[in-house]
Image (tube, grey):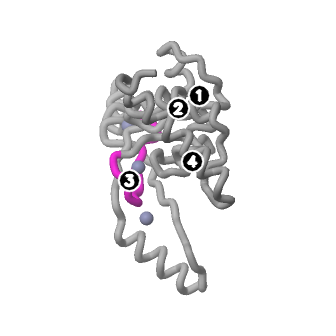
Amino acid sequence: MSTRGAPGRRATVASVADMAHSRARSADGGLTTPLGQVRHATRQGQAIARVLDDLVEFRTAQDIHAELKRRGHRVGLTTVYRHLNLLAERGSVDVLRTPSGETIYRRCAVASHHHHLICRFCGRTVEFEGPEVERWAEKVARAARFHDVSHTVEVFGTCDECATRTADRRRARRP
Ligand SMILES: [Zn+2]
Ligand SMILES: [Zn+2]
Ligand SMILES: [Zn+2]
């Protein structure tokens, strides 16, 4: 057995083994995924992460699934959903609900708490921080004696470009 070569690969195997070991040892350990699934999940997870890196706007799981298929990855829609939920739990992907009830996902530029302005026509997204919103949410919660609160504030609208385009089209239609 060689002691040289593929140190990266060995390190990966070792760390996975360590994870399994610590899982067996600690009852409270966060790892509940069986070994085989970890390796499998990593490959699919990487493909999904790459797609998320390339997609600029918020997209549905179906969109992401279609993009994976276009790139030649054989991943089921259920798997895509599972990975997206995992990424969302870790905070590495933002999840929103559109006014029409669709769930959309996006890898955000900032990891800290923030809000979004989303164009409902083209999906253009602007991230913003809202100190006023934070203060307001705290105040409302405190007044109602709520603890450990969190909030989601997203603003949907028509971006300037889409508004201009719609106006142009309306003008063109006029006799
Ligand atoms: Zn975001
Ligand atoms: Zn727009
Ligand atoms: Zn906030």
> On the image, numbered disc 3 is attached to which residue?
111
Magenta region, mostly helix, strand or loop? Answer: loop
Give the x, y percent position of residue 66.
55, 21
Q: Nearer the viewer, mark 1 or mark 3?
A: 1
Q: Residue at x 44, y 31 (%)?
A: 10
The amino acid marked with disc number 4 is Arg
Residue 47, above or below 91: above
> On the image, numbered disc 1 is attached to which residue?
40
> On the image, numbered disc 4 is attached to which residue?
97
For label 2, being within 8 Å of ligand 1 is answered no
CA gap, disc 2 to disc 3? 21 Å
Q: Nearer the viewer, mark 2 or mark 4?
A: 2
Label located before the other in sequence (1 or 4): 1
Mark 1 lies on a secondary structure that is: helix
> On the image, numbered disc 2 is attached to which residue?
42
Label located before the other in sequence (1 or 3): 1
Label located before the other in sequence (2 or 3): 2
The amino acid marked with disc number 1 is His
Give the x, y percent position of residue 116.
41, 52
